[in-house]
Amino acid sequence: MIKPRSDLTAGPAERLTERMGGGEDEAQAVTRARGGDNEAFRFLVERHSRDVFRLAFRMTGNEHDAEDVVQETFLKAYRKLSAFEERAQFGSWVHRIAANCAYDLLRARVRHDERLERTEGPDGDRTLTVAADDPSPERLLAGREVRRRLRAALARMSALERSAFTLRHVEGMSIAEISRALDLDASAAKQSVFRAVRKLRMALGEQAQWGITT
Amino acid sequence: MSHLSEEELVLHHFGEAEDAAEAQAHLSECATCRAALEALRRDLAAVPMPEPPARGEDYGAEVWARLQPRLAERRFERRRVWAPLGLAASLLLAFLLGRHWPHEAPVAAPVSAAARERILLVAVGDHLERSEMLLVELVNAGADGQPVDISTQQQYAEELVGANRLYRQTVVRAGEPGMASVLDELERLLVEVAHRPSSLGPADLAEIRSRIESRGLLFRVRVIETQVREKEKESTKTAAGTKVVS
């Protein structure tokens, strides 16, 4: 069952850097990995894979895409290790790379949304799903209507808006962190979050009449 | 102070307001804005996001197992790309010469000639397919008007340039102006992509896109790729027939 992450929306979200705290062993691994030690890089991959997967899944909403993002993220990290500043947190750095990879994938996917929509039919929803505690016909009907509205809202959302919103709303990244991760200036990141919120609210604004309460 | 705008409320909710103290002071006095903020919070709490499927303790090791060969691949990629080029180029030359002077060319053992032709066709077909994929990526890049990091595509382009040069030179020597022209155009684009800055803005991307589209490069690459693939199929059928007969 999937529930809204109200714990993250009610107040300041858990900071990415807090979750991705490094430590001395990690700093040593980074130094060794930069020197070409693959075992050290393995340590870093194994340590951060699950967090990177979670971020990738939340951004792409799709398990297969998320796995691709995980692989692409660590390949990019491996290639760019020489550019990594050792004073920084490896976890935060690799998260930014993951966000960027997922954003790239979303941009490519948005271009094919119409085709996917046709393939999956009107009830297919690759990105957002709605929990339904009570499977009564009315509830199911209402849930379907909300899904339809959310799908419409997502269709109106650009890859940038979707990415920025997920990073801010779910991952708790600051606007500054989002702008770094997605190679944007801060005002563009801010505007993207705002536009995404507006589109979702427009879609959700009518849910009361369908009997959905939160 | 007038009421907070929707944007200001969103920024305040996310802790990104430019003047948080001022917004907070207003909220403490204004019931309308407090209600609006509460409504915003309720709406955002209602947005369901997909919960990631659980990954076990071994997930990191699984990721590494899939990743490790690709790291090794990356390290040796350049060497692998170049290794078959000499063979492919000589085969290409033999193939093209064979097409022009089939009756005058020395008759090699039939199975051996067919095998060489198939290797060649696969190599050229793959090169054209990889080039086509790159062109498609470049045409589609930055469709939302945002800057794009093309460092991966640049690395790819750099690798394709070497192969393309060899094929082009061979084709020119064999007197195939049509194919040579496409490979020449492709090569110039690959070189240009490889040497651009890794982050491209909308104008740069539009320029590359226009260059690919205005000269029909993608279409022309697809046409010769199709021709090569058709030839490859024929060659495979012939080889299968030869095996049955022998």
Image (cartoon, coloured by chain):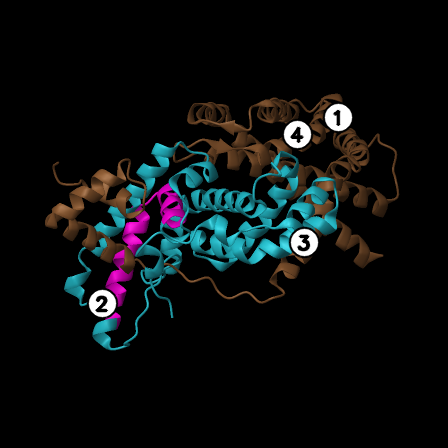
Chain colours: A cyan, B brown
Dot 1: element: helix
Whether B104 is among the magenta residues is no
Q: How far, Cα to Cα, is label 3 from label 2?
A: 47 Å
Amino acid type at circle 4 is Glu
In screen coordinates, is A50 left or right of B73? left
Q: Chain of mark 1?
A: B
Are the residues under marks 4 and 3 on the same chain? Answer: no
| Of labels 1 and 4, the one closer to you | 4
Amino acid type at circle 3 is Phe
Residue in view at x 88 percent, y 44 percent: B109
Amino acid type at circle 2 is Ala
In screen coordinates, is B105 left or right of B233? right
Location of residue A99 with respect to B98 vertically, above or below: below
Q: How far, Cα to Cα, is label 4 from label 3?
A: 31 Å
Are the residues under marks 1 and 4 on the same chain? Answer: yes
| Of labels 2 and 1, the one closer to you | 2
Q: Dot 4 corresponds to which residue?
A: B158
Question: Residue A209: where, in percent of width, then height?
Answer: 14, 63
Q: Dot 3 corresponds to which residue?
A: A43
Are the residues under marks 1 and 3 on the same chain? Answer: no
Nearer-the-camera pick, B242 or B32: B32
Residue in view at x 58 percent, y 33 percent: B151
| Of labels 4 and 3, the one closer to you | 3
Nearer-the-camera pick, A113 or B98: A113
Q: Chain of mark 3?
A: A
Q: Dot 1 corresponds to which residue?
A: B170
Location of residue B153 with respect to A137 vertically, above or below: above
On residue A142, the disc is 2
Dot 3: element: helix
Amino acid type at circle 1 is Thr
Question: Residue A203: where, in percent of width, then height?
Answer: 23, 53
